[in-house]
Image (cartoon, rainbow, N blue to C red):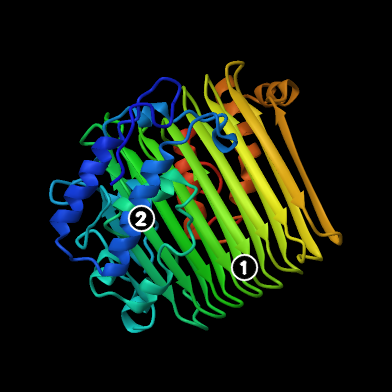
Amino acid sequence: MPSISEDAGKMSGVKQDRDNLVVEFESMAAARNGALPQWLRSIKEDAMERFVDLGFPTTRLEQWKYTNVAPIARTELKPASNGIESSTLDLSKLRLVSTPAATLVFVNGHYSAALSSLSTQASEDARLRTGNLGEFLKNDDENVRGRLTRYADYQDHAFVALNTAFFEDGAFIQIPSRTVVQDPIYIVFYSDGSGKGTLINPRVLILAGESSESTIVEIYAGDGQNAALTNAVTEIVLGENATIDHFKLQQESDVAFHISTVQAHQDRSATFNSHSVSLGGALVRNDVNVVLDGEGAQCSLDGLYVESGQQHVDNHTLIDHAKAHCSSRELYKGILDDRSTGVFNGSVIVRKDAQKTDALQSNKNLLLSEGAEINTKPQLEIFADDVKCSHGATIGQIDPEALFYLRSRGLDSTAARALLVYAFSGEIISRIKSAPVRSLIGGALSGKITLGGDFPGSDPNEEL
């Protein structure tokens, strides 16, 4: 491995202790003793070298201008050990609706067969493949070999490089062509917060065959008083005319660090619907990148971030219109209270040959206190001349007249305020088609915002 200089990265005076990570990487490589296929070992070595070269990103980089990861960089990170045996995880606390959906559970990044279950459809249809990525890697599965690490770029993204170098396990889902998976597939990553500086690197690979349909829900949850880092990467590949509804619910502890990258690649006429909901964490960064690489492809990106205390949530999205006749819709909403800070940076790129592109982007934010702060930057880069594109951002506070109206109808100040906050977020919740998932997210949201009961939408049988 390359040597690491004392001032590498020059992170505002914070020394980055990458030497420790190099030692950990070499120790893990020795412990595996050649268990991984050669192609993956080579990629991991290259990714580690690239991370050492890049270092942790600093605020001098435009993409990280408003997010300082110095608290992560100065933490002595150590890859999580297998904590499954000591875990007392109760999935009922996560409010997963009882359906025959497949559920893959990982504790501190390690697969738990005891907590996981396969759906009836997955058991009966051998072509529907769901399971822990580690087993597929041990068997050198050809589908995994041909796709894993091919879409999420680690050459220019330090945290993707770190994940690629260190991931040991994760989820692999392959939806067969012309197959409709009726029920959601849940992927649960749980951090028990048992150790300070624990580094967890979940990896997810989702392959959707031609004309398939599926709903996949990633849940990141955790507890404990120690600041762990979850550094997740999800690669999603949609074949021609495939449809995926992808949900990411982040509700880790308020001291946790969370960095994630979702990279989607769409073929002709494919449809990708992304829903990102961030409720927990002390420092959170969500990257969602989509490449529309086939004519007629369409995507929608919905996001909701609810912050309080001194939480910091940074949402970066990139929609790359690489081919003609594609459409994209994006709506991110933020609710910020106390002294929390938020960032939204949404980029839409329309390539030269991507004529007839139709793109709409919007970011709306509600500030509940004078100390809350949002930095928003929606942007378009258009290199074609026959397109229909627009973007916008709004920042506002609760309407005092609406608050007065609700209080005049008998609600106290807290309930009236919470009801108006829910109304602001309701547009995102109502766009969730799956009743079980709508219940899951509505219930999680009700736990974040006090209303004196569950929000509308947290009942899966309720019509919205």
User: On the rendered structure, is 229 left or right of 399?
Assistant: left
Mark 2 or 1 closer to N-term?
2
Residue, disc 1: 271
Element type where label 1 sits in the image: strand
Question: Residue 30's spot in the image, x, y percent?
Answer: 15, 55
Task: Report the front residue among 78 and 328.
Answer: 78
Question: Residue 294's spot in the image, x, y percent?
Answer: 66, 72
Please state which amino acid type lies under the numbered disc 1.
Answer: Thr
The alpha-carbon separation of the residues under discs 2 and 1 comes to: 33 Å
Residue, disc 2: 46
Question: Residue 176's spot in the image, x, y percent?
Answer: 45, 80
In the image, residue 83 sits, relative to residue 210, either above or below, namely above
Residue sitting at 41 percent across and 30 percent down? Answer: 282
Residue sitting at 40 percent across and 66 percent down? Answer: 148
Residue 46 visible somewhere in the drawing: yes
Name the residue at the right extreme. Answer: 386
User: Could you say which disc has been placed on residue 225 in the image?
Assistant: none
User: On the rendered structure, is 413 left or right of 114?
Assistant: right
Numbered disc total: 2
Element type where label 2 sits in the image: helix
Which quadrant of the view contains residue 194? top left
Task: Report the front residue among 152 and 131.
Answer: 152
Residue density around tag 2, few if under 14, some if 14–19, many if 20 or more, within 10 Å: some
Image quarter in which the C terminus is found: bottom right
Which quadrant of the view contains residue 98? bottom left
Task: Report the front residue among 430 and 385.
Answer: 385
Please state which amino acid type lies under the numbered disc 2.
Answer: Asp
